[in-house]
Image (cartoon, rainbow, N blue to C red):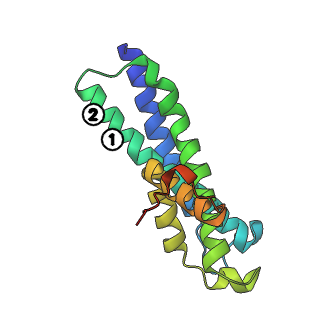
Amino acid sequence: MAMPLKAAVAIYIVALNLSLIALLIKVWPVALTTAGAALWSPEGRFLIIAAAAGALGSYIHLATSFVHYAGNRSLLQSWGWWYFLRPSIGAALALVVYFVLRAGLISGSGESATANLNPYGVASVSALAGMFSKQATEKLREVFENICATKQQPDPKSEIKEIS
């Protein structure tokens, strides 16, 4: 990868990091007496936290990858799209994980449900989903297969009958 392109990717990575951290700080649940607290509903705030934390987790993965490959002088231009799209994939995956966890673990809706949510828990699970997207996707596949499992008919060829 040419040096100007490496520099552009590095600048993108730094800007992305600062933007994600600023977004998390801006939407983090605080006392309702602060200015701007009414901009988002509590649920909307948690959705933004989940997406931003998932993108941040993906950012950690992509920044580590970039530093490793750029440092070893083996960074390839063909991976540019991966670096560009990785945070969006992490954000989307973190939202899906958040929806799955909310659907199965937390009852209630509106203020009562979000009052009991721990923003640190939402952010940590979301960040881990973004950072380890392959494992998170596999776990979601397992969950979906269990939920939507169909009863399989036994294969007659696999049945061995003993003759006595």
Relative to 11, 3 lies left or right = left
User: Does residue 121 appear anywhere in the picture?
Assistant: yes
Which numbered circle lies on residue 64? 1
- Whole-percent x and y of residue 124? 46, 66
Q: Mark 2 is on which residue type?
A: His
**Which residue bears the numbered disc 2?**
68
Closest to the observer: 103 or 119? 103
- Whole-percent x and y of residue 34? 66, 75
Callout 1 touching callout 2 (CB < 8 Å): yes
Whether 115 is drawn above or below 163: the answer is: below
Closest to the observer: 154 or 92? 154
Relative to 2, 154 lies left or right = right
- Label 1 neighbour load within 10 Å: few <14, some 14-19, many 20+: few
Relative to 2, 43 lies left or right = right
Residue at 53 percent across and 59 percent down: it is 142
Circle 2 sits in a helix, a strand or a loop, which is it?
helix
User: Does residue 23 appear anywhere in the picture?
Assistant: no
Q: Mark 1 is on which residue type?
A: Thr
